Image (cartoon, grey):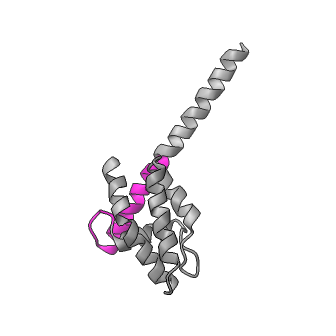
Amino acid sequence: MKIFIFIACALTIATMAYTADVQNAQKFYTDLTTCANELGLPNEFSLHVVKCMFEKNSLIDEQGAMKKDEILRYFGYMTSDQRQLQRIASCIDHETRVEENNDQKTLAAIQCSLFKLAILEKQY
């Protein structure tokens, strides 16, 4: 009986985790569509659409700086490939070191990451 309860609990937790991943993936693409429509742009990854997605999810702070860990978690819902996430992280790290204002750094990091995001888009 204890084993049955343990298995039932494990299956329940696994189902909840899978459902959360599916919901996060759906939200990601809903954000993409919403931002593209608001900006009057095609429904695809572009510099301003991704920036809008970041802003809608509070991934950019009040000063316009990117919240790296939260951005990586956001894209982590879309891929489990750590190499892709590391490439995005390297774009953020590289661009935040430049001597520009936060908005320009954010746009440069997004531009750097767009190729990686296109790879993510092809996976789903």
Q: Is residue 57 above or below residue 3?
A: below
Residue visible at 41% across and 76% down in the picture: 108
Position in image of residue 59 (x %, y %): 54, 68
> Is 30 within the magenta?
yes
Position in image of residue 33 (x %, y %): 35, 61
Tell which residue pokes out farthest to the left in this image. 42
Judge left or right: residue 92 versus residue 50.
right
Residue visible at 55% across and 68% down in the picture: 58
Residue visible at 45% across and 68% down in the picture: 91
Residue visible at 52% across and 65% down in the picture: 57
Tell which residue pokes out farthest to the bottom in this image. 100
Image-quadrant location for residue 50: bottom left
Image quarter where the N terminus lies is top right
Task: Write down the region rendered in magenta.
Answer: 23-45
Position in image of residue 124 (x %, y %): 34, 47
Image-quadrant location for residue 15: top right
Position in image of residue 18 (x %, y %): 51, 38
Q: Nearer the viewer, residue 108 or 39?
A: 108
Q: Nearer the viewer, residue 94 or 121?
A: 94
> Is 40 within the magenta?
yes
Q: Is residue 20 above or below residue 61?
A: above
